[in-house]
Image (cartoon, helix red, strand yellow):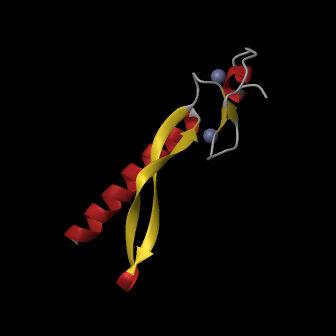
């Protein structure tokens, strides 16, 4: 499989991973490896993270979108705390 983002730039580069967000194949240059914590539910419905973190591979676009969504969630929490 070839890198989807490279193909858009007119290049023909072998892909090494697949983005978990959009399913596009990506080369090492376009793959962003991020830690990803699995969770399990403990007593009284508490969600706890499990060590060690696994990984999530995203393309540049999905990483950006993910970061933006994470920022939005944070500001929403902020707002609801204040009101
Ligand atoms: Zn690429
Ligand atoms: Zn993606």
**Image point (72%, 23%), residue name:** 8
The quarter of the displayed image where residue 22 is located: top right
Q: Viewer-proximal residue, 25 or 82? A: 25
Q: Is the C terminus in the top left, top right, bottom left or bottom right quadrant? A: bottom left
- Where residue 27 appears, x then y in whole percent? 64, 25
Whether residue 80 is situated above or below residue 50 in the rendered picture: below
Q: Residue furthest top?
A: 11
Q: Position of residue 76 (x, y in %)?
A: 34, 62
Q: Is residue 21 left or right of residue 48?
A: right
Q: Residue at x 57, y 21 (%)?
A: 29
Question: Is 11 positioned to the left or the right of 43 in the image?
Answer: right
Q: x, y (%) of residue 9?
A: 69, 17
Q: Quadrant of ligand 2?
A: top right
Residue lying furthest bottom: 44
Q: Could you say which is closer to the camera, residue 48 or residue 32? A: 48
Residue ID at (70%, 26%): 15
Q: How many marks?
A: 0
The residue lying toward the viewer, choosing from 53 and 31, is 53
Q: Residue at x 67, y 28 (%)?
A: 16
Q: Is residue 58 above or below residue 9?
A: below
- In the rendered structure, the answer to whether residue 76 lies left or right of residue 12 reads left
Q: Is residue 18 above or below residue 54?
A: above
Tell me the quadrant of the picture where the N terminus can be found.
top right
User: In x, y percent, where is residue 51?
Assistant: 40, 55
- Which residue is the extreme one toward the right? 1
**Res 2 quadrant in image:** top right
């Amino acid at each position: 499989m070839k890198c989807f983002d490279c193909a858009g730039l007119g290049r023909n580069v072998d892909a090494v991973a697949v983005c978990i967000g959009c399913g596009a194949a990506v080369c090492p240059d376009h793959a962003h490896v991020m830690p990803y914590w699995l969770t399990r539910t403990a007593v009284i419905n508490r969600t706890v993270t499990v060590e060690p973190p696994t990984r999530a591979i995203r393309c540049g676009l999905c990483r950006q979108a993910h970061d933006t969504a994470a920022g939005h969630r944070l500001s929403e929490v902020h707002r609801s705390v204040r009101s």
